[in-house]
Image: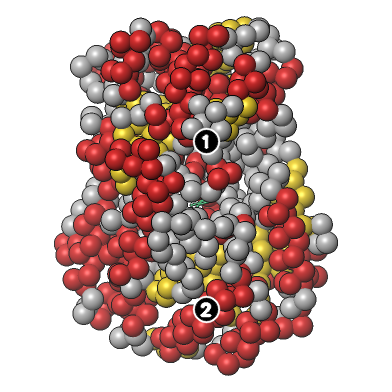
């Protein structure tokens, strides 16, 4: 430090310390936080974000979500001079394939830090992408979530047992950028007072000029009883009803209390899913009945699923054993399920207290309006999108940079990607796009080399949460037919990945069945290679969605509210093989690949139990044959047909990615929902 810069830096650090009181700052965190630098990033952006959240003349949003998938392992990772505990790395991954001997002896070595393990799947990744885009757009926001000290879980595939979950451990104190605050948020419910510790993490904008703090709540304090300490251990683990209710209380009630303690001035409370609905109750407790109407003007709610199991319901008696009478009175007033009056329904609570409600795709909007007809006039649509800086691959980004004069400033504003369409007739661009894709495929095949995954073989992936309505095994429904396609058209590689919720027994049995079918294909490994990767996470989501030729999305309509992994794929020119559901209903007219299978129409939502595997399996194989045929016509043994319709579809994909970006999504939230 020298001259006036040094003085400015010293006063900036002082201001940071008064705004963000960190436990053990001296001797521990002061090694990574100086006047100039916050773990390698500009400290100034943080101080400005904190100032704006305190200012009463800045309109700020508090975004509540049970989970956040931030991809911190590869997107803007913080640097630390302190040693990072080995528990914060996750380097060895196993797989299950139809080359079983390889699976026994080999693993995939991934040289990376663990992503902050506070998410399970798409809901969390969406929350992370939304917060990052809010930072990019310079919106004043704070995210509220939970510091899951045991993450979600570690997944093992065991032949004849299916998925075997294992508890995971990581080390928050040495996770770079994660700060324990000195604050304790204390609240009493019906019984004991419970203390919550606060942690902070910051999401920087892509240009590092703005930041959004994430406030993470942690009940694992020595002063709390053992059952309370466990509340914030494992995401979506709640062995009994008390546990489940209390987790929602931590997020909603303690979350609001934490905002108050920090002195943030919040205009809009955004409930990302019904988990956080009790936040309204916390605010309403302080308001007199006349003010409550005005309070409802400040709440908005995003509904993410039409699946019944996705909506929290609790018996009133169970709620009564947890909450004090004033809390119960409010919960009863706003949250009583209209069909089952003995039940509290958090979705109903969230809907009845929110000025704006939104679904996450146009199709989901129609379904939600018919499912919750009493609120139909308030239900809007904001179609999901993905954070383009996180999900774009380097080769494709470099190509778009080269063509920036024709496309425009796509890094700052990804909606200009629409203009990639203008390059359709440019032979050089078409060839370069194919090459960029080949580079991504090369990276993927290098990682899976031991399984003999090759870059010149047609490659399909299905990777997402293993839930029944997503139909994880559809592509394995008739393996003889799969083999026939490979024999007739050319070799096929199929990559699969995903976690099933440990309490989802149906999904569990399903994994077992998938492993059996894959195993039975051992003889055919020269024609058909199938690899199922353990521990699907954001790192693998990026690798797979960027590097395969075809992204398979086969949910049973209309149960997929949106789906976002396909959006990560199209941003990189990866084609779609999809049923007509969620975001794909809006994307299908753009010709991003192949649409197949049963179509949902009319107001009846139908049954999740009727999975239509036989008929949709046949439709899938038909479309897969077309895709494989066009792939091998486009490129065989290194020769490329640059005029191939495959490349037109790749261009359609990238052009559509502008709309399906979190930048567009957050801009929509800002204008249509938040009013900030
Ligand atoms: C993007 C993503 C998802 C979402 O997948 P969809 O089923 O397409 O919505 C799930 N898990 C991870 C790890 C992701 O990165």
Whether residue 358 sits left or right of residue 543 in the image: it is: left
Mark 1 neighbour density, 10 Å: few (under 14) some (14–19) many (20 or more): few
Tell me if residue 130 comes above or below residue 457 in the rendering: above
Quadrant for residue 403, please give it.
bottom left
Residue sitting at 58 percent across and 53 percent down?
465
Write down the residue under mark 2. Answer: 619
Quarter that holds the C terminus: top left
Looking at this rendering, what residue extends furthest in the left direction? 405
Residue closer to the observer: 163 or 407: 163
Q: Position of residue 600 (x, y in %)?
A: 44, 64
The reply to whether residue 276 is visible in this rendering is no
Whether residue 208 sits left or right of residue 104 in the image: it is: left
Q: Position of residue 46 (x, y in %)?
A: 35, 24
The numbered disc on residue 218 is none
Mark 2 neighbour density, 10 Å: few (under 14) some (14–19) many (20 or more): some
Write down the residue under mark 1. Answer: 339
User: Could you tell me how far apart the alpha carbons at marks 1 and 2 are, in whole angstroms?
Assistant: 39 Å
Residue sitting at 50 percent across and 41 percent down?
124
Residue sitting at 46 percent across and 85 percent down?
626
Q: Earlier in the sequence, mark 1 or mark 2?
A: 1
């Amino acid at each position: 430090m020298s001259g006036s810069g040094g003085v400015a830096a010293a006063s900036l650090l002082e201001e940071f310390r008064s705004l963000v009181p960190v436990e053990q700052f001296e001797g521990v965190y002061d090694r990574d936080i100086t006047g100039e630098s916050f773990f390698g990033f500009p400290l100034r952006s943080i101080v400005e974000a904190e100032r704006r959240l305190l200012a009463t003349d800045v309109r700020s949003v508090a975004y509540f979500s049970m989970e956040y998938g931030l991809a911190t392992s590869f997107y803007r990772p913080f640097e630390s001079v302190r040693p990072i505990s080995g528990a914060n790395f996750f380097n060895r991954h196993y797989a299950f394939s139809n080359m079983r001997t390889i699976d026994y002896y080999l693993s995939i070595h991934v040289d990376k830090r663990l992503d902050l393990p506070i998410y399970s799947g798409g809901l969390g990744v969406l929350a992370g992408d939304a917060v990052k885009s809010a930072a990019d757009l310079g919106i004043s926001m704070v995210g509220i979530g939970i510091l899951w000290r045991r993450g979600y879980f570690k997944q093992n595939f065991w032949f004849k047992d299916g998925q075997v979950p294992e508890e995971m451990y990581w080390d928050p104190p040495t996770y770079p950028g994660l700060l324990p605050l000195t604050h304790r948020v204390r609240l009493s419910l019906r019984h004991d007072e419970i203390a919550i510790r606060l942690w902070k993490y910051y999401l920087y904008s892509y240009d590092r000029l703005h930041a959004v703090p994430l406030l993470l709540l942690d009940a694992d304090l020595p002063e709390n009883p053992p059952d309370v300490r466990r509340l914030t251990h494992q995401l979506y683990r709640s062995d009994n009803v008390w546990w489940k209710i209390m987790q929602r209380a931590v997020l909603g009630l303690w979350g609001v209390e934490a905002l108050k303690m920090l002195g943030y001035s919040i205009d809009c409370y955004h409930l990302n899913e019904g988990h956080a609905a009790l936040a309204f109750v916390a605010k309403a407790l302080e308001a007199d009945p006349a003010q409550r109407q005005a309070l409802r003007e400040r709440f908005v709610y995003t509904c993410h699923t039409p699946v019944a199991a996705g909506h929290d319901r609790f018996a009133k008696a169970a709620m009564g054993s947890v909450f004090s009478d004033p809390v119960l009175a409010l919960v009863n007033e706003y949250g009583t399920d209209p069909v089952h009056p003995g039940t509290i329904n958090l979705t109903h609570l969230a809907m009845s207290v929110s000025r704006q409600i939104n679904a996450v795709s146009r199709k989901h909007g129609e379904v939600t309006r018919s499912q919750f007809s009493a609120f139909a006039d308030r239900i809007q649509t904001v179609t999901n999108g993905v954070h383009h800086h996180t999900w774009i691959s380097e080769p494709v980004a470099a190509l778009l940079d080269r063509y920036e004069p024709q496309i425009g400033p796509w890094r700052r504003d990804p909606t200009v990607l629409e203009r990639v369409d203008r390059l359709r007739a440019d032979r050089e661009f078409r060839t370069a796009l194919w090459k960029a894709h080949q580079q991504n495929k090369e990276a993927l095949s290098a990682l899976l080399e031991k399984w003999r995954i090759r870059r010149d073989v047609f490659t399909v992936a299905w990777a997402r949460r293993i839930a029944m309505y997503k139909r994880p095994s559809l592509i394995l429904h008739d393996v003889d037919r799969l083999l026939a396609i490979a024999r007739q058209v050319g070799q096929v590689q199929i990559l699969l990945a995903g976690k099933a919720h440990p309490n989802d027994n149906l999904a569990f049995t399903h994994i077992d069945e998938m492993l059996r079918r894959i195993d039975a294909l051992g003889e055919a490994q020269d024609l058909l290679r199938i690899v199922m990767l353990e521990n699907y996470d954001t790192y693998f989501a990026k690798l797979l969605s960027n590097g395969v030729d075809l992204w398979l999305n086969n949910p049973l309509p209309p149960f997929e509210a949106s789906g976002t992994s396909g959006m990560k794929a199209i941003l990189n020119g990866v084609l779609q093989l999809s049923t007509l559901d969620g975001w794909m209903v809006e994307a299908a007219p753009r010709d991003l690949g192949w649409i197949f299978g049963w179509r949902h129409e009319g107001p009846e939502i139908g049954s999740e139990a009727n999975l239509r595997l036989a008929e949709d399996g046949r439709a899938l194989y038909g479309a897969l044959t077309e895709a494989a045929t066009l792939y091998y016509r486009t490129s065989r043994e290194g020769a490329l047909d640059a005029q191939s319709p495959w490349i037109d579809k790749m261009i359609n994909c990238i052009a559509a990615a502008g709309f399906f970006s979190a930048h567009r999504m957050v801009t929509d939230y800002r204008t249509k929902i938040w009013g900030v």
